[in-house]
Image (cartoon, rainbow, N blue to C red):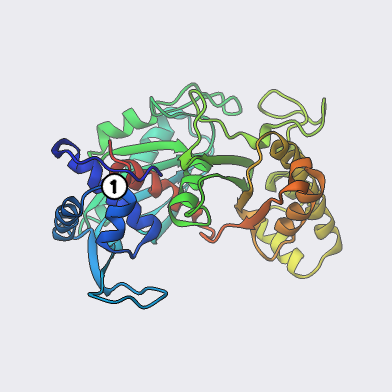
Amino acid sequence: MVLKGQNTTRTKKLNQSLVLKLLLQNGPISRQQIAEITHLTPATITYLTAELIERGLIVEKGDLQTKSPRAGRKSVALDLNGDSYWVLGIHTSMDRLKMGLVNLKGRITDLQTIPVPSKFNEEEFLAFTAERIKSYLHDHSEMVIEGVGIGALGVVDIENGKLLGNQRLGWPDVELVSYLQREISLPIYLDNNVSAMTLAEKMFGNGKQLSDFMCIYLGHRIGAGMVLKNELYRSGLTGGGEFGHMTYIHQGKPCWCGNKGCLNQYASEQAILEELQVSTADEVLRKAVDRDEATLEVIEKASEQIAVVLSSFINMLHLKKVVLCGTLSNPILPVKNIINKEVNQCSFLARTDAIEVESSKLGENIEVIGAGGLALWYGLYNKK
């Protein structure tokens, strides 16, 4: 997050977004601290914050608490007014839609999970998705919802709002945003689901105070996103992040992507379910709690496989913190501890300067928080 403002009338909206971003990252803080960090004049900050207070986006929260007592007049603390601004966050995959309202501080409410019929083609999927979003918005018509963020499973053309062709389903590119925009009058923001989760970690989670970190999603499949120099990393059309399609074994198990030996085929939730011959992740969690030996052995092996690929990645790009999210990051499982141990033993660079691996604190609904984060970030916090 680049936190430097500009003292010109034309950039008032940008500066207001900057103040909101700063409060998200560091609030509650005083007007004086905001001026010092952004290099805007105190008068400009007074003007900007007065308007944001009038709009209800920020509030005064009494005297600012400091670690050491100071002489003179106490500073007034400013903070975000979380429930003053709501967006709709939607996580979409081929089998379900998961949606909920997300506020300025990443709080989620009114969560719904809607199964998607398995035999849909792309046109039916688009119509179904649009109708479910409209129905949700109608059911919450008493609220002012400012935008819609969508985190989508699969490869996404970010600039053009498309889901790129799905080889497994035989679908062509799906013009998701343009279709929905004809049906829904709100601004719509689309990104890959793991990129959205990584953004959520930067906005609300373990990466809030970090300029560089990696987020790895350990769910039905494995994916990743990175924040570098305070910005969500982008590479080319899709943004990158297909950690699960890094090769674990040369000429190994065939993967739907067309390659062989992808990490997804060995260490994802789907691979674990197939190896244990169970149907749901909840069964795996129950067996792990019961200390089932075969289950723990499979989970340990998958964790070590993830660590092998991650160790090589860390040797190339030495990110000092890795945040794990998704089903397999559940603290009742040993996954985080095993990956942390193995990476710090196996990575050449980590042995010199340790890597910290930790589980996300955003919970099981991080997909929806991340999707909502897209609408918050690009519609308010990073408005351009």
Residue at point 62% right, 52% down?
324
Residue 180 vertical placement versus 19 (above, below): above
Q: To which residue does mark 1 refer?
A: 39
10 Å crowding of disc 1: few (<14), some (14-19), many (20+) = some
Of 64 and 248, the residue lying toward us: 64
Q: Is residue 136 left or right of residue 210?
A: left
| Quarter of the figure with residue 258 | top right
Q: Position of residue 105 (x, y in %)?
A: 36, 59
Residue 29 vertical placement versus 345 (above, below): below
Q: Position of residue 343 (x, y in %)?
A: 76, 48
Residue at point 82% right, 65% down?
292
Q: Is any atom of residue 303 visible in this view?
A: no
Residue 331 vertical placement versus 173 (above, below): below
Of 152 and 46, the residue lying toward us: 46
Residue at point 22% right, 38% down?
185
Residue 226 vertical placement versus 31 (above, below): above
The kind of residue on which mark 1 rests is His
Which quadrant: the N terminus? Answer: top left
Of 273 and 243, the residue lying toward us: 243
Assign a secondary structure to mark 1.
Answer: loop
Which quadrant: the C terminus? Answer: top left
Q: Position of residue 31 (x, y in %)?
A: 25, 60
